[in-house]
Amino acid sequence: MEIQVDYVISNTECMLLYGPGTIQPSTICTRGENRQSTCNGDSGGPLVLEDDRTLVGVVSFGSAIGCERRLPVAFARVTEFTEWIRNKTGVAAGSGEGTTTESQ
């Protein structure tokens, strides 16, 4: 399922809800309008830019009280892990290697 993320919130704002030990510099927190959010089983799903489909985050966690509660969703910030990804896969960020296209 695809949801619309309406805006990214600051990590400071996210920490007020989830606690300072939970939110790290490698976290991106988002909010969606109309109670849209990720749900159980969505971990590992992508956060992509709408205009060019650039992967910027991977679902890490959301509210423990359930989905669609208007609470932020936390994503792992891909740019914080590019060296690790390169070391594990041998693919450099932005190289286009490993790129696939979907026909619709």
Image: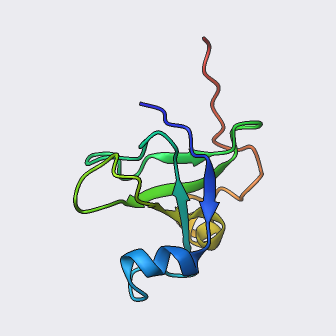
Q: Relative to 2, is 78 on the left or the right?
A: right
Q: Relative to 18, is 23 on the left or the right?
A: right
- Residue occupying the point 71% across, 59% down: 92
Which quadrant of the figure contains the C terminus? top right
Q: Is residue 60 above or below residue 34?
A: below
Camera-nearest residue between 8 and 83: 8
Query: How is the structure coloured here?
Result: rainbow
Residue at the extreme bottom: 21
- Residue occupying the point 40% across, 59% down: 71
Res. 56 image quadrant: bottom right
- Residue occupying the point 65% across, 56% down: 91
- Residue occupying the point 52% across, 54% down: 31
Whole-percent x, y for residue 69 in the image: 34, 51
Q: Is residue 64 above or below residue 99?
A: below
Q: Relative to 52, is 48 on the left or the right?
A: left
Whole-percent x, y for residue 65 in the image: 22, 59
Res. 52 image quadrant: top right
Camera-nearest residue between 18 and 58: 18
Whole-percent x, y for residue 23 in the image: 46, 79
Which quadrant of the figure contains the N terminus? top left
Camera-nearest residue between 14 and 2: 14
Q: Is residue 100 above or below residue 18?
A: above
Whole-percent x, y for residue 36 in the image: 43, 41
Q: Relative to 3, is 71 on the left or the right?
A: left
